[in-house]
Amino acid sequence: MATQRPTIAILGADGVPEPANLDEISELATIRPCTAQTLPAALTGADVLLVWDFFSRALKDNWGPATADLRWVHVCAAGVDSLLFDDLRRSDIVVTNAAGVFDRPIAEFVLASILARDKQLHISKRFQEQRTWQHRETARTEGSSALVIGTGGIGRATARLLKAVGIRVTGAGRTARSDDPDFGTVVPTDDLAEHVGGFDTVVAIAPLTPQTERMINAAVLSAMRSDAHLINVGRGQLVDEPALIDALRSGDIGAASLDVFTDEPLDPSSPLWAMENVAISPHMSGDVVGWRDVLAEQFLTNLRRYLDASVPPAEVLGNVVDKDRGYVAGATRTGGDSRL
């Protein structure tokens, strides 16, 4: 059962705007804004940790007596790979995430990446800069095929949007099935190399777990079509980056649109920057105007549930993460604004 007025440590970062609804949160709880450097003092006696700086690993670095009173940690990201560690997994602390907020924006980004390549928008921009009038024929998007690796909320939103423009979509997930409501057919991710060769586009959206790390390896890349387009909007570590560079150089695959990388920011010396068949964006696929406001409202919704409950947090909060699997599995999703 929640305390009458909980104390919330809000972990931010220098230069990152604080939640816009701090006044509303402070009406319900005592808040302690902090950074990684001041987190130990803010955690002492705190019931709740709001990880606003969602790539921070500061909780792991400060695990110990200061976290004795923690009951709930909310991270403002869909992926929780930066947050989870063994001590947290073994604890009774409930972890929730921002599942639902980024589904539609990332789906739109994936569709934009497909259309940009099919319609040669990057090449047109290059010709424009050269003041060159060069007529070309472009690929038809309708009727093409896509394998979406990851069948959670973001993957499903992506499948629905791609199908709406006539793309034939198949999913790849932990369990194979033939009657999925969004994908129809889902093939097992353990057998990616056996399936990727049948698709024009391969989209990586799976959460980063020990099972999915470098799942798109040299064997999978070599099994893809030579004109295939790889899109990664999940985590950089889903892809064996050196193997991808080799595949792009050799022509084993046609192109890649990469929003995430093994190390971020991407090093200026990376050969990916100079490749004409690569489109690079700085981990922004889900960041639409107003996204931080939606994250803040999502947390406030969960905080009200936490305060109103007479049962343990795991039984009432939305987006409860399965700490062993590393993602929300079958829980109520609190996506905030339905437009997202």
Image (tube, helix red, strand yellow):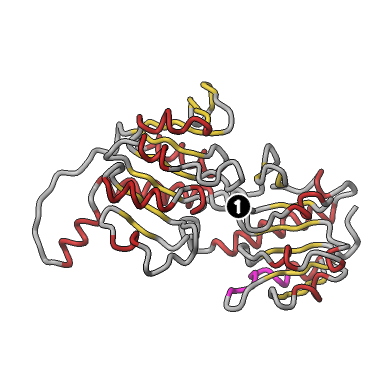
Q: Is residue 74 left or right of residue 272?
A: right
Q: Which residues are magenta?
A: 16-23
Which residue is nearer to you in this view: 241 or 307? 241
Task: Classify mark 1: residues with Cα within 10 Å, few (<14), some (14-19) or many (20+).
Answer: many
Q: State the count of labels.
A: 1
* Residue 317 x %, y %: 76, 48
Kindly identify the residue that appears in the image at 53 percent across and 39 percent down. 150
Which residue is nearer to you in this view: 225 or 49? 225
Q: Is residue 109 left or right of residue 227?
A: right
Element assignment for label 1: loop
Which residue is nearer to you in this view: 111 or 334? 111
* Residue 304 x %, y %: 78, 56
Q: Is residue 235 left or right of residue 243?
A: right
Is 337 covered by the magenta stretch?
no
* Residue 214 x %, y %: 50, 46
Kindly identify the residue that appears in the image at 21 percent across and 56 percent down. 123
Which picture quadrant has residue 60? bottom right
Identify residue for label 1.
79
* Residue 6 x %, y %: 85, 64
Relative to 35, is 226 above or below?
Answer: above
Question: Callout 1, which amino acid?
Answer: Gly
